[in-house]
Amino acid sequence: MTAPAASRSESACRVRDAALELFAEHGFDGTSLQQIADRLGITKAAVYYHFHSKDDLLAALVEPAFDDLDALLGQVEALPADSARPRLALQAFTEYLLQHRSTAAWMSRDAGALTRPAVWERTRQVEQRLDVLLTSGDADPLARFWTSVFTRAVSGAILDQPDADEQWLRTEVAELGKHLLSGYRAARRRQQP
Amino acid sequence: MTAPAASRSESACRVRDAALELFAEHGFDGTSLQQIADRLGITKAAVYYHFHSKDDLLAALVEPAFDDLDALLGQVEALPADSARPRLALQAFTEYLLQHRSTAAWMSRDAGALTRPAVWERTRQVEQRLDVLLTSGDADPLARFWTSVFTRAVSGAILDQPDADEQWLRTEVAELGKHLLSGYRAARRRQQP
DNA sequence: GTCTATAGCGCGATAGAC
DNA sequence: GTCTATCGCGCTATAGAC
């Protein structure tokens, strides 16, 4: 039997976890398979048994997070497109960040990983879906400005506090989301009175 | 005469500009000196004449931006520590981002560059100074939460809109800053009534 | 399932001709 | 000031023994 790239054996999980730690510390390009192997006391070749390539390892790290975010966004998109949608979209995004804090924190800052085709494509896709949900389809500069504010503010609020309590963050981010959305509505009124 | 690492000859500037473009596209680690040379139609060795190492090239890219930010923060720190200071700190940060949009946009997302000792040290330093200015020295979780919100929201608002007009951004970000600061004050009141 | 050994490549960096 | 040529290294990845 050849190497099962998609399996979740205990050894494979240990490799994946060690890789995430090292990627977060030194970046994707800055981490070699040798370093990952050394940390676990195994050899480079053993890493290759579990993941056919460095990109396979990257995919194993990010795909569960993307899959969850896809599902969460799908739930919001299935709801009627009323005025409550932007807040629910922010809530979905918050849940994704809380459930994948370490992966998302690293991924959002690592250009070396973000620019790999597999990651790049899914990133662009979810960003666009979030954009539509948050700004109700508005496509002008003000909408794009505020989409960045929403996503960056919420991402930073969660991912920059690795030791903060999850439930405390959930409530503070919910308040933050409401405050930001009211800021967006005010900016719209200011622009088109 | 040996290579003048700190000089700003026309050729050196062309190398620096090409490097920034490629670093932004492929990341610091993902860009080789060969690629930089190829883009300019020169050789790798010619690049090494202008910059003694890849890290020298990195330093030449980021140090002017850090120097400007240092100066701007110094101006705010020289003012009395009153209630206007957080807004002025955000204004200084905004000016830095507007004046170094392309460099800052790349740097803030590139783990490979951020983790180089020279960049890492200055980044940590300015982040801490900004933190103190924005939250008036508060050091609890709520203050750190909002420091992230301030910096991430403003960074995203500016750096994610590479084609937006500078003056338009300046006024929108000023409004955003006021709105965020009022959110922080409200959160403090909510926590300690 | 994990190992040793190594292929094959591209990297950063250097030496010295012109 | 820019070139050619090359070194030594560490990387991803493979082949095949155990």
Image (tube, coloured by chain):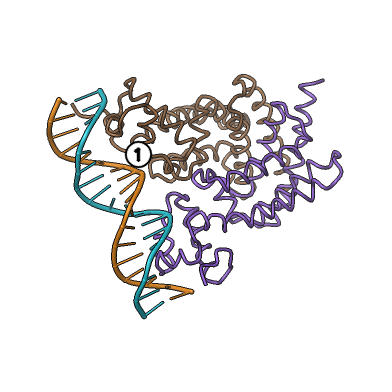
Chain colours: A brown, B purple, C cyan, D orange
Where residue A157 sits in the image (x, y, percent)?
63, 32
Q: Residue at x 29, y 29 (%)?
A: A50
Q: Which residue is mark 1?
A: A55
- Give the secondary structure at mark 1: helix
Mark 1, other Cα within 10 Å: few <14 / some 14–19 / many ≥20:
some
Instruction: Give percent across and percent down for residue B30.
Output: 42, 50
Q: Is residue B159 left or right of residue B193?
A: left
In the displayed structure, does residue D1 sit left or right of residue B142?
left
Residue sitting at x 76%, y 30% = B138
Residue B3 to residue A47: above or below: below
- Kind of residue at disc 1: Asp
Whether residue A193 is visible to the viewer of this picture, yes or no, is no
Q: Is residue B46 left or right of residue A136?
A: left
Residue at 52% x, 58% y: name it: B57
Q: Nearer the viewer, residue A86 or A20?
A: A20
* Horizontal arrangement in the rendering, residue A48 relative to residue A103 (left or right): left
Q: Which percent across, then down, holds residue A136?
A: 59, 38
